[in-house]
Amino acid sequence: MGGNASSKDEMGQIFKTFDTDGSGMIDRVEIMAYMKTNYPKFPLQAVDLLIMLADTNGNGQIERVEFPDFYKIVQACVATDMVLKNIIYTALSAENCEFITKAKIIKGLKCFGVIVKPAELNKNKYNRDEFMNEVEKMFE
């Protein structure tokens, strides 16, 4: 129990570093400011993807209950080489490191203004190499 309380307290402190206005929710502007300050090489166009993946109630903000999952995705993404397609893959595969589903690719790329129709993707699941090849074509 002590470990859980400690990590919960630690997570609360980290949440406060994002939540600069003290509203109890983290909005896009706060996330962008945090990332720009702490990870200057992080491509800020990926912020909407991070929000979309962790915002379970769809209000466009990260609430305290959503924050642990959000922060896990952030940590995985900042551990990459900061290349956008690697960040996209890492964020989309945070729950399952083996594959990304077609639906998740379509939803995730929409955050970047890339509209992908289901018929444009030939498979239902993509491994890392397959995903990178598809994304390469879409961002050309």
Image (tube, rainbow, N blue to C red):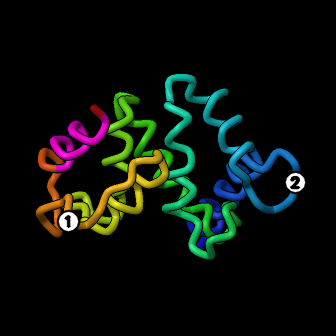
Q: Which residues are magenta?
A: 131-139
- Residue 133: give x, y in percent of width and height: 15, 41
Secondary structure mostly seen in magenta is helix
Q: Residues within 10 Å of mark 1 (few under 14, many from 20)?
A: few
- Residue 134: give x, y in percent of width and height: 19, 46
- Residue 47: give x, y in percent of width and height: 56, 45
Quadrant (top left, top right, bottom left, bottom right) of the N terminus: bottom right
**Which mark is drawn over residue 22?**
2
Q: Quadrant of residue 115?
A: bottom left
Left or right, 92 with respect to 127, comes to right
Q: Going 29% across and 62% down the picture, which residue do you hit?
A: 117
Residue 41 position (above or below residue 104): above
Residue 113 position (above or below residue 9): above
Of discs 1 and 2, which sits in the foreground? 1
Q: CA distance from mark 1 to mark 2?
A: 44 Å
- Answer with mark 1 or mark 2, whichever residue precedes in sequence: 2
**Which mark is drawn over residue 95?**
none
Residue extending farthest to the top is 40
Label 2 sits on what residue type? Gly
Q: Which residue is mark 1?
A: 119
- Residue 36: give x, y in percent of width and height: 63, 29
Label 1 sits on what residue type? Ala
Q: Secondary structure at mark 2?
A: loop
Residue 38 position (above or below residue 123): above
Q: Residues within 10 Å of mark 2 (few under 14, many from 20)?
A: few
Q: Secondary structure at mark 1?
A: helix
Q: Going 73% across and 53% down the picture, which residue do you hit?
A: 27
Residue 131 position (above or below residue 41): below
Q: Going 20% across and 58% down the picture, which residue do you hit?
A: 120
Left or right, 60 with respect to 132, comes to right
Q: Going 20% across and 42% down the picture, which residue do you hit?
A: 132
